[in-house]
Amino acid sequence: MVAAVVRRGAVVRLTMFVILPALAASGGCSEKRLEVFPVSGKVVYQGKPPVGATVVLHPVSNQIDQFAPTGTVKDDGSFAITSYDENDGAPQGEYVATIEWYRYDKTIGGVGSNVLPRKYANWKTSPVKVNVGGSETQLQPITIN
């Protein structure tokens, strides 16, 4: 299974978007915590929730460039963003959201390729813009066809 993941480059993505933020949140980072505000939303792909898809907020401003707040899509399509503690949100600012969904592939016995359209996987091409204000942010539903 690991070999399949390495072939697909998913290990790099997993490290960047899941493991590194978790290490920073666990105290491995001596930086002062920024104030965060709850951020939640919903994703639908071809009429169904992409359960397990990863939503990553990429800051537009350099003021918060050390962050990559993330969320995971649940069974109902909802997600909540995490920066430090589970579902705590993101610092105030403007973001571009990327969304990737890697499903199990029986033919290779491991993680397959991203099944969502490519433009959603790159912060330069993703059409999903997010503005986190100084209070709770409920995003408009994200519909991917």
Image (cartoon, rainbow, N blue to C red):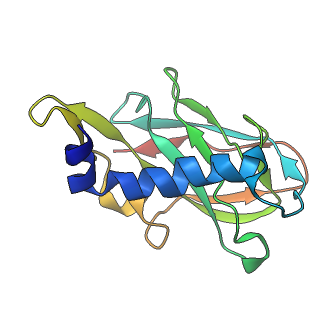
Q: Is residue 22 left or right of residue 91?
A: left
Snapshot quadrant of residue 64: bottom right
**Rendering coords of residue 6 (x, y %):** 26, 53
Q: At which x and y percent is residue 25?
A: 74, 47
Res. 98 in view: no
The answer to whether one can see residue 38 in this image is yes
**Which of the 4 image quarters holds residue 57?**
bottom right
Q: Residue at x 56, y 48 (%)?
A: 19
Location of residue 135 with respect to 57 vertically, above or below: above
In percent of the image, x 58 and y 30: which residue is there? 78
Residue, far bottom: 62
Image quadrant occupied by the N terminus: top left
Residue 70, percent from left and from top: 61, 47
Residue at 74 percent across and 54 percent down: it is: 28
Q: Quadrant of the C terminus?
A: top left
Q: Nearer the viewer, residue 113 or 143?
A: 113
Which residue is at a point 60% across and 41% down the rendered structure image? 71
